[in-house]
Amino acid sequence: MDTISLELQKREVSGNKNKALRRSGVTPAHLFGHGVKSQPLQGATAELEGAIRHAGRSKLIGLKIGEEKRARNVLVREIQRHPGTGLLLHVDFFQVRSKERMTVEVPVHVVGDAPVLQSKANTLVVEIPHLNIECLPSRLPSRIDIDVSGLKATDDVVRVRDVKMADGIVLLNDPELAVVKIEVERKAAVVAPAEGAGEVVVAAAEKQPEQTGETA
């Protein structure tokens, strides 16, 4: 289990005063969880950005608050950014319990070589980029590997039911959903030309009526 370290401080300001924090390179945050007292926090924007980049929403963060000696295991729950500039505005963290099962979205990672991709007309498509799982924090994977080495034909599919998970981890997605499939490039239909005419390719758009030159 990978854990990323982050240190934050308790936050004393709120509301419009948070704008001054952001201008000084500090981002407001919040901690909550089951049976956990909600706490307003703050930390250096650069450090928060780094933690978010490495952890995403599926890696545990060892969060140390102020003078506390023990780090708390938390997950990034929500990220707020400015819609125009992308500036980090606020981060919510959820504290997990070591003996409490949790539901998390984990990214899909494709591994292996699919024989069907030897044809340049075939493309591998990831239909579900994140899978929902339930597990204890100690069993939380940073990613879910999807082996595509068994894809030999264009109609081969890796479904949720085909994904093998370690003991103690339960997949919550519909078992029949396709996680990875093959998409085949479709070529335009070719109509046999009349004698003496060149090759004609039928376009997908509807054919327009010919202009007769007559006016209404």
Image (cartoon, rainbow, N blue to C red):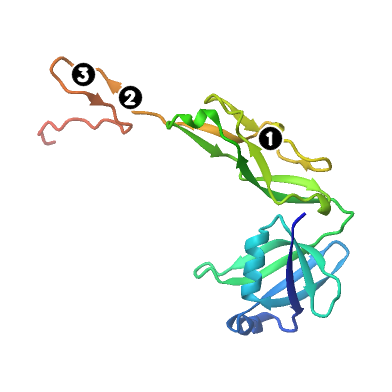
Total marks placed: 3
Residue designated by label 2 = 189
- If you read the primary sequence from the N terminus, does the residue marked by circle 2 or circle 1 appear first? 1
Q: Is residue 145 left or right of residue 203?
A: right
For the residue labelled by badge 1, is the local secondary structure a helix, a strand or a loop? Answer: helix
Q: With respect to residue 22, does 104 lie above or below? A: above
Q: Residues within 10 Å of mark 1 (few under 14, many from 20)?
A: many
Q: Nearer the viewer, residue 18 or 153?
A: 153
Place residue 196 in its image quadrant: top left
Tell me the residue at 65%/61% (across/down). 54
- Is residue 115 shown left or right of residue 193? right
Q: Work out which quarter of the rendered image holds the C terminus and state it.
A: top left
Q: Nearer the viewer, mark 2 or mark 1?
A: 1
> Residue at coordinates 71% horizontally, 72% vertically from top-left?
29
Quarter holding residue 43 = bottom right
x%, y% of residue 148? Answer: 60, 34
The residue tagged 1 is 160
Tell me the amino acid under the disc marked 3: Pro
How would you rate the neighbour count of disc 3 (Cα within 10 Å): few for under 14, some for 14-19, many for 20 or more?
Answer: few
Any mark on residue 45, and which? none
Tell me the SS state at disc 2: loop
Whole-angstrom CA distance, mark 1 to mark 3, is 47 Å
Q: Residue 64 appears in which quarter of the rendering? A: bottom right
Q: CA distance from mark 3 to mark 2?
A: 12 Å
From the image, tell me which residue sits under label 3. Answer: 193
User: In this rendering, is residue 159 above or below 193?
Assistant: below
Frontmost of labels 1 and 3 is: 1
**Spot occupied by residue 173 in the image (x, y as percentages of width and height):** 71, 39
